[in-house]
Structures are given as structure tokens and as C-alpha cells.
Image (cartoon, rainbow, N blue to C red):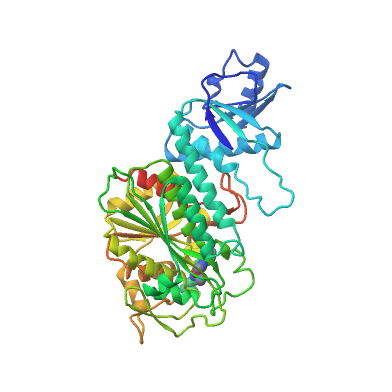
Amino acid sequence: MEIKKISKFNPKINVAFVINSVNELDKSFFSSAEQNYIKTQHKADNKIVVVNRLTQFIFVVFTDKGNDYKTCQITRKAACKLVEKANELKISELTINTNIQSSFAFAESLLLTNYQFLKYFSEKKENSLKKIGWFGKLSTVEITEISNIAEATNLTKNLVNEPVSALNATQLAEETKKLGKIAGFKVEVLNKSKIEALKMGGLLAVNKGSVDQPTFSILEWKPAKAKNKKPIILVGKGVVYDTGGLSLKPTPNSMDLMKCDMAGAAAVIGTLYALSKNKIPFHVIGLIPATDNRPGGNAYAPGDVITMYNKKTVEVLNTDAEGRMILADALSYAQKYKPELVLDVATLTGAAAAAIGHYGVVAMGNTDKKTMDKLKESGNNVYERIVEFPFWDEYNEQLKSSIADMTNLGNGSGGAITAGKFLEKFTDYPYIHLDIAGPAFIKTQVDYISKGGTGVGVRLFYDFIKNYK
Ligand code: BES
Ligand code: ZN
Ligand code: ZN
């Protein structure tokens, strides 16, 4: 679906008036009977009123006044309802006539709600809604910006929804290259022999049980006049499928959704896409270690000691804690860029999902307070809210090994945090870890967030980086 700014309002075609109160109803447009109907519906707390004029549908959508983050979320939900109604009524084109302050959120939600992943249906039941004409507040530049962000979020969902049979590590890297060409960011893909030459022991260990090759992708958006001297680095977990490896995930159902274990990688790709399409003036690098985690042939085993990229050794006590093994190598690799800040994003632990469900993103880190506060603010702005977990050093005690520098497994208490502390050992820069195991993939639609891959992280990172300095 596309949104186009229009400069002249055509009162004869399908239109949605998005307003804050009945006082804003255009008296020259609605008959008094229609006005009364709308007022009665509004009194009955109906947030979206449909007037059927035979030749056109008219929607009156009510949302709250303001542009604070809670109001924006109410507006996103209203936009979602409008798209659903329009599709129910088989409408293909619709004009939005509005001056609400939260227009940005409204437009964004239209594009996010209308997302579908139909690739594998033989009969595709496509949404009817294809074109939005935007009349009112929001410039052409803003509409382009919103469209690029939504496109990036929706392509991130595509990547997550794609099963491993069609998206192994190499295919993910190929997709990344294609997207880089379209949006204008650089992509370098390190193949298995390069990864071996670099001695990325964590990534290679996880890949041992697989028949597919691992990849390590380096994405870069470097605008001519970047406002930051040292790059911001985003690291995404790219486990294209997680069986648990030899520590096989216990049935039933615990493996069903594990194609989503590259949602962190997908979010990094989507973010670079949005940043470069919108030419955001910050130098950003994305690092994506990718492989599947399988129990095949020569799979890494509990008890193995792995020498990581930075030469530290890890005693593997559970092969299902694979995300931290591949991320650790990427985090040590990030050191060579002398980054100003590194954020990783990963479907890392069931513990994070168990703690807060799909309602938010678990975060922890060792940056100054201001940076974490800014991230939380962005979390509110895009309604991918951040919950900060403690990052106390005492959690390190759980990672002590009797045979190597550390183990890859805590004792179960504070599981999301011990995973984060494990990763921190591979950093030497300001660092924030985001665990998206909860919100990355949902089984049923939640308002404008479609079921399946959610694209979580893209809008969050975009907002954070855009407002970085
Ligand atoms: N990919 C999983 C985490 C996960 C769980 C993601 C649910 C999405 C939804 C991760 O690799 C994993 O298996 N983590 C283990 C770690 C444990 C062995 C320390 C977990 O959380 O059980
Ligand atoms: Zn796992
Ligand atoms: Zn995993």
C-alpha cells in the first residue's frame, strides 16, 4: 500500500475524517441527519463511525488530542481499526482528511496494519486497500519518511516469517545485499573460510552441526556529513533456526517458532534500510553473525571448550545457549571500529519472554544513564517499551567454569541477565543488550502489529539514532 500527499480534497470519493471531537465535523459536508448519527455513535463510545452514501463510504475516526506517546498509541489503534473496516468493505482507495497532532503515528499505523505475508498461500486473499491519499497535516517529506520506516519494518517481518527452508544463513546474507543495493547501504559478507581465517570460534562451533555454511555480514551506512565521528554499531542475532543443537529443545512446541531466532538480525537489516533510505546523518554499522543451530554430524557438544574470536575460552554447558556464542564473536569484532556505542538485539532467552511477555523489550547495559534514558524515550515514542533489568556484576559468579574462562550457562536465576553478562565480557565500549525473545514473534495479531514476525527493533533504533545528538 502507498500513501500519497494530495493538495486538493475530492469530497466525492471514499474518505476518512480523523478528528478529536464532534465539534470538528465539517458542517458543509455532512447533512444534519448524518451529523446527528455521528454524534449519537460517538456518545455511545464508537471510535469509528461509517456513513454509507451509496457512491462513497465516509469514515469518521475519533482519537485523542495531543502527540504524547500514550495518545500516539491510541491513534495507532484507531488507524488499525480504520484499515480493518476498509478491507472488510473491499475498499481499494481512501482519502485521509486530518489535522490531528498525532498524524505521524496514524499514517505509520495504516502502513503497518495493512501488512500481510501471503507468499505461501496458493490462493492469496489480499487486502483490498491499496492507495491512501493524504490530505492535511504531514508534508511530502514526512510521508516519504514514514513510508520508508514502514517499508523497512514490513520487510523485517518478511525476513522473520520466512522459514529456514527458504532462508538459511547464506540466503539471509544474499537478501541483505539486495536490500543494501536498494536502500544505499554497503554490505560485505564474510563466508565460512573467511570466518575460519578470523578464528570466530563461537560462530564456527554453533555451525558445526549444520550442513549449511555460516555467514558474517557487515552492513554500513556512512553518510558524507555524519554527526558522529566514531560509529554506532548494531549487532543482531542471526540464528536462522534454533533446534537447541545436541541440547535439543524439549518437545512439545518449543521449536515451532524458532525460525524467528534471527529476528535481531532482521531488525538490524531493517534499521540500516530505514536509516539509509531516509539519509539519517549518523554513521552506523550493522554486524550479523548467522547460522542455524542443529544437532547434526559433528555438532558442538556440552563439555566442549571453545576458543572464541577474542581468544577467551568458553565451556559449553548447553548448546541451546547458542545465541551468546555467535554474538560474543560479533561483539569482540566490533572493538576494531572503536565504536561510540554498541547495541545488540537478540531473541536470546526464554527468561526475558517469561518475565515481561510480548509487551516490551528487555534491556540492560553499562552506558551512561543519559544514553539508556534516551533509548527508553524512543521505546515510548514508538511504543516498543523498554524495561531495564539490573546488570550487577554479581551475576558473573554464575558463569565461572572449572575448566575454562567462563561457561555459557548460568544457574537459571536471572537467566536473561546472565546471558547479558556473558556478552558484556566481549565488549570494551559503552554497551546495551536488548532481549526481544518476547516481542519478536506473536501468535495472534495485537492491533497494528500483525501475527508472526513483528519487526520489533526497527522503529526503536530508527527513532533512537535519528534523535541521537
Ligand atoms: N532462541 C532461544 C531463546 C528464545 C526462546 C527465543 C523463546 C524466542 C522465544 C535461545 O537460543 C535459547 O534457547 N535460550 C535458552 C538459554 C538457556 C539454555 C540458558 C533458554 O532461554 O531456555
Ligand atoms: Zn537456543
Ligand atoms: Zn536461539
In the rendered image, the vertical position of residue 390 relative to residue 277, given as above or below: below
> Which quarter of the image is occupied by the N terminus?
top right
Q: Residue furthest top?
A: 28
The residue drawn where x is 74% and y is 49% is 123
In the rendered image, the vertical position of residue 52 relative to residue 31, given as above or below: below
The residue drawn where x is 49% and y is 60% is 173
Q: Is residue 368 left or right of residue 108?
A: left
Q: Nearer the viewer, residue 82 or 184?
A: 184
Image x and y of residue 465, in percent: 36, 47
The residue drawn where x is 49% and y is 74% is 207
Image x and y of residue 33, in percent: 68, 16
The residue drawn where x is 52% and y is 60% is 172
Image x and y of residue 443, in percent: 61, 56
| Badge count | 0
Image x and y of residue 156, in percent: 52, 52
**Residue 439 in view:** no
Which picture quadrant has residue 294? bottom right
Q: Nearer the viewer, residue 438 or 200?
A: 200
> Which quarter of the image is occupied by the C terminus?
top left
Q: Is residue 301 left or right of residue 230?
A: right
In the rendered image, the vertical position of residue 119 relative to residue 202, given as above or below: above
Q: Is residue 440 left or right of residue 236?
A: right
In the rendered image, the vertical position of residue 303 relative to residue 345, given as above or below: below
Q: Is residue 324 left or right of residue 441?
A: left
**Residue 333 in view:** yes
Q: Nearer the viewer, residue 158 or 435?
A: 158
